[in-house]
């Protein structure tokens, strides 16, 4: 039974699973369509200040002038993404943020990185359900090209995610992780 006092967005941000047939599910599609309209503008823009302005509109938060994003960029909702200062997001990144994405200061994100705070159960009976879990990228993290960070994962301070990795579990501070699934390769401090 749905909780009538919380929106579908609040439920997902709280980590609740929501079936496709939930009465408010249509609101997700509507919100994502609104975000896509802004993305069309962002992905055709070359002026960094205007890109930051559009990203601020998409995330409903202030994007600091020290932060840079190189389009093209894809994000489904936007309002559950928080981006710190001096963050660099390179070309072709994809964020699914209904579960929440926090990127702290001084983070570098290479091309084709996917931050996916959403998923679906494996069991076929429940697969038409949206699951969500917060992604937290802490200070000074570097995420290599074509890496994927899955729902519910925290990447610890100063850590590096090697290119092509799939991170399905939390990463401690000050390590390099790599592989599928990502495992600690070495300590860096």
Image: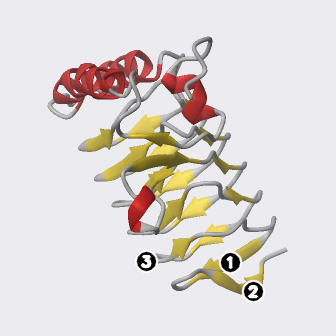
Q: Position of residue 83 (x, y in %)?
A: 57, 33
Q: Secondary structure at mark 3?
A: loop
Disc 2 versus disc 3: distance between alpha carbons?
Answer: 17 Å
Against 64, residue 90 (above or below) is below
User: Which residue position is annotated with label 1?
Assistant: 176
Viewer-nearest of labels 2 and 3? 3
Observer-nearest of 75 and 10: 10
Disc 1 versus disc 3: distance between alpha carbons?
Answer: 13 Å
Within the image, what quadrant is residue 23 found in?
top left
Observer-nearest of 109 and 184: 184
Q: Residue at x 60, y 80 (%)?
A: 182
Q: Position of residue 39 (x, y in %)?
A: 24, 29
Q: Earlier in the sequence, mark 2 or mark 3?
A: 3
Q: Secondary structure at mark 1?
A: strand
Against 99, residue 90 (above or below) is below
Hey, which residue is sitting farthest top in the picture?
Answer: 5
Q: Cβ–Cβ below 8 Å for labels 2 and 3? A: no
Task: Answer few, some or many: residues within 10 Å of disc 3's Cα (few below 14, many 20 plus, some between 14 and 19).
Answer: some
Q: Cβ–Cβ below 8 Å for labels 2 and 1? A: yes
Q: Earlier in the sequence, mark 1 or mark 3?
A: 3
Observer-nearest of 90 and 79: 79
User: Which residue position is annotated with label 2?
Assistant: 186
Q: Is residue 59 left or right of residue 133?
A: left
User: Which residue position is annotated with label 3?
Assistant: 164
């Amino acid at each position: 039974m749905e909780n009538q006092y919380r929106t579908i967005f609040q439920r997902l941000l709280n980590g609740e699973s929501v079936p496709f047939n939930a009465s408010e599910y249509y609101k997700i599609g509507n919100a994502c369509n609104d975000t896509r309209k802004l993305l069309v503008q962002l992905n055709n823009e070359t002026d960094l200040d205007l890109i930051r302005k559009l990203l601020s509109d998409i995330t409903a938060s202030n994007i600091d002038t020290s932060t840079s994003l190189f389009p093209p960029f894809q994000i489904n909702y936007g309002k559950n993404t928080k981006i710190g200062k001096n963050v660099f997001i390179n070309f072709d990144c994809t964020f699914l943020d209904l579960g929440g994405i926090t990127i702290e200061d001084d983070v570098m994100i290479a091309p084709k990185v996917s931050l996916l705070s959403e998923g679906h159960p494996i069991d076929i009976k429940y697969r038409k359900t949206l699951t969500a879990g917060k992604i937290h990228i802490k200070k000074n993290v570097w995420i290599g090209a074509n890496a994927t960070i899955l729902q519910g994962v925290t990447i610890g301070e100063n850590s590096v995610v090697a290119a092509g990795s799939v991170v399905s579990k939390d990463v401690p501070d000050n390590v390099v992780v790599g592989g599928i699934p990502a495992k600690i390769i070495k300590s860096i401090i």
